[in-house]
Image (cartoon, helix red, strand yellow):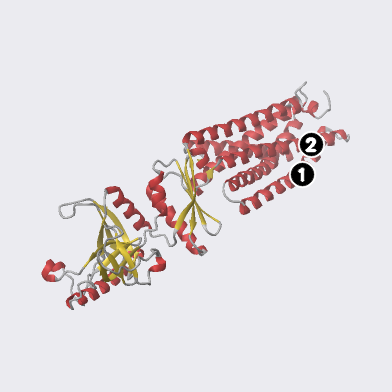
């Protein structure tokens, strides 16, 4: 009965190991490489002032959408602590543009113009420093985006609409009417309703002779991009704005400079404005060459360690060393497949610290075999036969392995939740490897050793047999 069960377990172990590695290669799935292995740029963005957890979470989501729209392959965006956001862009080509887009607040507001302060005015009020959402409910003074510090200033009423109403934003190339690139904005239903009421109010002010107060200012990040008044039906035919009716479609446009600027602005408007102001507190750049060298060094170290373990096991434990080779092959296939699947499904990136965790796990797995085989020796030296020693020793050895792996796994879990950055990658790979070691020990190692002990031809082979490895002689 036990023999049949061991054969099933052994077959299952090989099917899982071989099947998983064949599946990932057949689907061209492979582990995602982190910044330190792929090369690229890493940025830590720090929120100015206190940031609520929900606001920081929303900011992470917006940044992730912006990076996805840029087409960056395999990025990583994660919250670090209560104020920091880690952004890793492996393989990015134009990192300056990417960093500017990621950290751009893109605070878009529509405000009524209260007063114009010309460049030559004797008394010019100070320009409002606040440009984010904290200034939406206040009167502000902003400069024109097209003028310098001495250009026209706009005293503006509180924001009537914000960038939240943008349903679609698209870069529009120059045409016969517009000689520069612009960004066309289409509003959602709520924006359409508010826009209609707002433009109706401004049209009524225009009819009363308030030419300045009837202007709507489009403000982007604390600069007035445009300030246009409401056209009368006589001026613009059927497209004029009528008092009491307003504009029933919330469509407008922002004139910008070149094609890249228009596309970047359309991108950040589509993905939404950042609810908080972020500054770069740390920037790390890794060249692809350095990343490749790190990967090669990690792989070479792993292969060297694996080779030395196999040679030692074959020399010291003889035929039991073959069991170790098969177990390490299954273990490696499982770890590679799991890392590949997690990279494809959950976006997990393998860092150099993660490679170190896998290398350490090879030692953990080798320890499991040593524990098992030395336990068998103790059972044999106590006077039991080889089969009795295997039956009793492997059960006790697995209990020891389970306790040891539990300690290692608990340490990995604690380290994962308490650490930040690359250390978490080390903890994750070590934890996954520890779990794989338990499964391999239960399904493969016990079964392989038990079946080997039952084979007289394999267990009794001169110089290389299992009996010689356990000190029983020929």
Disc 1/disc 2 C-alpha distance (Å): 15 Å
* Residue 280 position in % (x across, y down): 47, 52
Return the residue nearer the eye: 391 or 229.
229
Residue indicated by mark 2: 390
Q: Mark 2 Cα within 10 Å, few/some/many (few <14, many 20+)?
A: many
* Residue 453 position in % (x across, y down): 76, 32
Residue 17 is labelled as none
Identify the residue at image location x=83%, y=24%.
Answer: 473
* Residue 99 position in % (x across, y down): 42, 49
Identify the residue at image location x=45%, y=57%.
Answer: 278
Whether residue 255 appears in this view of the structure is yes
Identify the residue at image location x=78%, y=28%.
Answer: 469
Q: Is residue 68 above or below residue 369?
A: below
Q: Mark 1 Cα within 10 Å, few/some/many (few <14, many 20+)?
A: some
Quarter of the image where one finds residue 446: top right
Indicate the secondary structure of the residue bearing disc 1: helix
Identify the residue at image location x=69%, y=30%.
Answer: 309
Residue indicated by mark 1: 400
């Amino acid at each position: 009965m036990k023999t049949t069960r061991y054969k099933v377990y052994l077959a299952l172990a090989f099917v899982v190991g071989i099947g998983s590695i064949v599946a990932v290669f057949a689907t061209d799935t492979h582990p995602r490489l982190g910044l330190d292995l792929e090369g690229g740029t890493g940025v830590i963005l720090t929120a100015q002032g206190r940031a609520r957890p929900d606001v920081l979470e929303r900011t992470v989501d917006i940044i992730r959408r912006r990076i996805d729209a840029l087409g960056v392959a395999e990025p990583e965006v994660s919250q670090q602590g209560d104020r920091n956001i880690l952004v890793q862009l492996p393989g990015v080509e134009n990192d300056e543009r990417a960093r500017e887009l990621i950290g751009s607040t893109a605070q878009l507001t529509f405000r009524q113009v209260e007063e114009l302060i010309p460049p030559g005015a004797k008394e010019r009020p100070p320009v409002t420093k606040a440009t984010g959402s904290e200034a939406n409910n206040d009167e502000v003074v902003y400069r024109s985006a097209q003028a310098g510090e001495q250009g026209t200033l706009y005293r503006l009423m509180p924001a009537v609409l914000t960038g939240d109403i943008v349903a679609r934003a698209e870069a529009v190339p120059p045409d016969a009417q517009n000689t520069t690139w612009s960004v066309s904005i289409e509003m959602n239903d709520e924006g359409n309703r508010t826009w209609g009421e707002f433009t109706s109010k401004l049209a009524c002010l225009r009819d009363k002779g308030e030419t300045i107060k009837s202007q709507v200012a489009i403000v982007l990040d604390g600069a007035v991009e445009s300030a246009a008044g409401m056209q009368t039906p006589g001026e613009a035919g059927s497209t004029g704005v009528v008092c009491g009716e307003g504009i029933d479609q919330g469509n407008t446009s922002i004139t910008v400079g070149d094609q890249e600027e228009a596309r970047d602005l359309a991108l950040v408007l589509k993905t939404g404005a950042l609810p908080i102001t972020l500054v770069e507190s740390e920037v790390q750049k890794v060249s692809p060459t350095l990343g490749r060298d790190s990967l090669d060094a990690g792989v070479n170290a792993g292969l060297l360690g694996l080779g030395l373990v196999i040679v030692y096991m074959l020399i010291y434990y003889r035929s039991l060393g073959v069991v170790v080779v098969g177990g390490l092959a299954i273990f490696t296939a499982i770890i590679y497949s799991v890392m590949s699947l997690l990279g494809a499904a959950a976006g997990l990136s393998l860092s150099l610290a993660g490679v170190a965790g896998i290398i350490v796990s090879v030692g953990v797995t080798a320890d499991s075999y040593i524990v098992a085989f030395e336990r068998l020796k103790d059972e044999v030296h106590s006077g039991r036969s080889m089969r009795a020693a295997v039956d009793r020793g492997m059960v006790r050895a697995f209990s020891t392995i389970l306790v040891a792996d539990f300690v290692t796994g608990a340490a990995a879990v604690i380290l994962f939740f308490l650490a930040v950055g690359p250390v978490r990658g080390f903890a994750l790979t070590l934890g996954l490897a520890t779990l794989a070691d338990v499964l391999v020990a239960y399904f493969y190692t016990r079964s392989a050793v038990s079946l080997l002990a039952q084979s007289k031809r394999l267990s009794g082979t001169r110089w290389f047999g299992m009996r010689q490895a356990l000190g029983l002689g020929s």
